[in-house]
Image (cartoon, coloured by chain):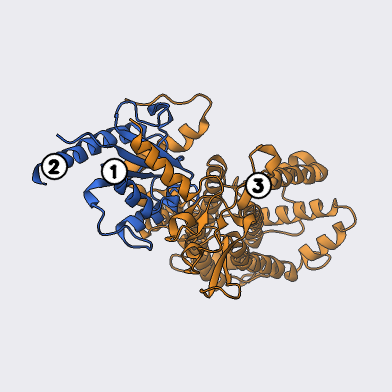
Amino acid sequence: MAEERTVITLICERAADINNLINDKDEVTDAPGVKVLKFPCSGMIQPLMVEQAMKAGAAGVIVCGCQIGDCYYREGNKMIRERLLGERPPGLKKTVDRKRVLALWLSKPQKDRFLSEAKEFLSVVRRLDIEESKKG
Amino acid sequence: MQEKMEKSNIFHTLFLEPEKLINKVVTSKYNPLYYHGALPQFIMYVLFLSGLLLFAYYVPTVDNAYFSKNLINAFTSVDYITNTIPFGAVVRAMHRYAGDAMVIAILLHMVRVWFTDRFRQYRWVQWLSGVVLLLMVMFIGQTGYYLIWDERSLLLTRMTVSAFEAVPVIGEPLKHWFLNGRNITNLTLSNYLFIHIGLSFSLLFALWIHYVRMTRPVITPPPALNYLLVALILVAVYLFPITETKMADLNLQPTNMEIDWFFLWPYWVLSSAGAGGYWFWITVLLAVLCLIPLPMFYGSKAVEAAEVVTNKCTGCRLCSLDCPYQAIEMVPAPAGSRFKLLATVKAYRCSGCGVCVGACAFDAIDLPDLPDAQVNLKIKELLEAK
């Protein structure tokens, strides 16, 4: 069986407040394998970063911004959402497996939602890993 | 599990909880809390339209030939609008309650902007122009009450005159400007009408300043919200029809009035604190509102503006198009460059949000705090750490 790969979370520091969900290694304590990198705004996340995370061996990438319509910096979450959907340049390359990218739009109090979504996503991408290793 | 609410955090109870609930019921697309800035703008259109209909029949005079049967003046024209024209009373009441709704919407906007910390640093222009807009809206609303020319209008006029007279040096000219002469005459009401309408259209200019540092300001709520808002105003119109009042009589001195707490509370201040106290409190209030964005109150560090990597920039304009604060300007590239344009950051407008970083496919713009290279390094580190 393939080794268990990591899921990278690129999250806006003003979205779901997950500070007390993560340990000092930037890993979600209740979902080991989900690691977190914070940004001042989800608008700063480049599709290129998603791509590079995958290239560097991530099983999947979670992009998390604030509720659509309520970005502290006005439009960051809309921008990255449109970029991931290919509606705004620069977009995400076609070679990136869309099944392995999860976008979440959560406001500050929604950390429980974040946790449950992250756990589910982790199990989904790991199942994908297993299926793909059987095939290939 | 319901998460524990932080102590003393009014913001949670006031906004986050209702916000969560509304998002659950109508989804974030229709959450009025996400359109708090656009709501007053929509109400302004309601006011413009209903005001236009009222304007068609309004006569700005004070002619006071009492007991004359066919007297035509401001009061009787308002009376005509209310009682004779089909749905005139509805339009008039809509104009009044939309005005009240405007004040409520502006206050909601202001309080939410304050609680969500979206009013200072690179946003101070928006806050200050907002204070000016609030002041304008208040004065427009008050002139609306003068225009009806009932006993309350007369009392308000005289109270305003007494407040102006108390101002040193320019008090007398202010009074003459306000009354459009030394006494209350027909010209007074045409001045009121001019202020009421002229200042209303000046709102558009002040709004331009309010929006000028923002790219794509959200100025239209979704239609569903607009319908709902108009429906709410109509409910108020039918539940609280405007009561009949008595025509102003220049020979009498009315002493009591009903107070519209949205627009007329300054007159309550005036009557309880006297003219001197009134100006004192109004100045204090305005000073506090204007000083709120001063950076020294927050001890926050200055924004680290984004920096363009000059030799990587291709002049593609994506960052300048996406910048939410109009902080990136495209200038002609220096001689010898392969490209026509070069992005430059106006540091005083930059919020340090990094949307430009997300927009750049060439890694040509960076936040000094968190450059791209560092992000990619961090991602690698996270993946390698076991």
List the residue tagged with mark 3: B257
The disc labelled 2 sits on which kind of residue? Ser
Q: Tell me the quarter of the image containing the N terminus of chain A.
A: top left
Is label 2 in a helix, a strand or a loop?
A: helix
Residue B353: image location, x then y, percent: 51, 50
Mark-to-mark CA distance, 1 and 2: 14 Å
Q: Residue furthest toward the left?
A: A135
Q: Residue at x 61, y 47 (%)?
A: B303
Query: Quick one: label 1, few (<14), some, or many (20+) residues within 10 Å?
Result: some
List the residue tagged with mark 1: A57
Q: Colour of chain A?
A: blue
| Residue A47: image tag | none
Residue B19 in sight? no
Q: Same chain for marks 1 and 2?
A: yes
Q: Residue at x 68, y 38 (%)?
A: B297
Residue B6: image location, x then y, percent: 48, 26
State the residue in front, B268 or B48. B48
The chain coloured orange in the image? B
The disc labelled 3 sits on which kind of residue? Met
Precedes in sequence: disc 1 or disc 2: 1
Query: Quick one: label 3, few (<14), some, or many (20+) residues within 10 Å?
Result: few
Relative vertical location of residue B360 with respect to residue B63 in this rendering, above or below: above
Query: Quick one: label 2, few (<14), some, or many (20+) residues within 10 Å?
Result: few
Chain of residue at mark 1: A
List the residue tagged with mark 2: A133
Q: Residue furthest toward the right?
A: B169
Mark-to-mark CA distance, 2 and 3: 82 Å
Relative vertical location of residue A43 with respect to residue B182 in this rendering, above or below: above
Q: Residue at x 46, y 40 (%)?
A: A14
